[in-house]
Image: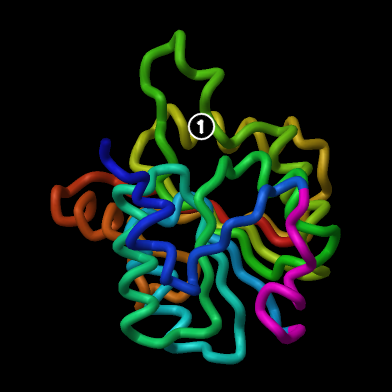
Amino acid sequence: MNQDPMTSESKRVDTLLRYDPRSFPPFADVFGNDHPVEIEIGCGKGKFLIARAMQYPDVNFLGIDLVWKWMRYAVERSQKRSLTNVKFIKTDAREMVRYGAQSATVSVFHIYFPDPWPKRRHHKRRLITGAFLRELHERLAPGGLIELATDHIDYFRQMQAAVVHSGISWSRITERLNNRLFEAEAETNYELKYSAAGRTLHYLELCK
């Protein structure tokens, strides 16, 4: 019988968290300090998050993903670099935000190229909704940011509609094409891939 990778090789990796979101401790306990926290939802192989963790040692970074076959690379890379300010958790992002992130504790939510679920009957599975934006907003620290990106125009329009449906008076809403709004030197794998393919990239930044 094959061993579950979450209980074999990764057992020795201290950057992988094993909490149930419903019993997730405060970030200060997880990281051992009260530094600002940035969260990437759908971190994949962790290229973006690890680059930022290396550049900003006084910021804590949490990567969330449900697909272990990709996230294992992020965990291994962060361990090889002995990064103490980046952690990863294999769980559902909605549950982690709802139960694991406390009010006013997150400085930035990064959500880049979430699954667009292009078929109409699957649109209900899309992550970005007005209700989810309300949950993210409640967990943002004052002046905190939500950074969104997609190459899918229909999904981008839904994101725009979700901002309206959230009913939140954001202090700033910024949109841009093909030019990242947030510190462009750190790019995701999808960002590089889609840019090289000539796709139009849509960026949206929401400030609390």
Q: Quadrant of residue 186?
A: bottom left
- The structure residue drawn at horizontal position 76% and vertical position 77%, both measured from the top left corner, is 28
Q: Residue 30: image x %, image y %?
A: 68, 73
Q: Residue at the spot x=56%, y=62% of the render?
A: 17
Report the front residue among 96 and 179. Answer: 96
For the C terminus, the quadrant is bottom right
Farthest residue to the front: give it. Answer: 1
9 vs 159: above or below: below
Q: Secondary structure at mark 1?
A: helix
Check if residue 31 falls in the magenta segment.
yes
Against 103, is 85 above or below? below
Magenta segment, which residues?
Answer: 23-34
Question: Quadrant where the N terminus lies?
Answer: top left
Q: Nearer the viewer, residue 142 or 52?
A: 52
Rendered position, 119 above or below 90 = above
**Residue 124 lies in what quarter of the image?**
top right
Q: Residue furthest left?
A: 197
Q: Which residue is mark 1?
A: 157
Residue shown at the point (43%, 27%) measured from the top left:
154
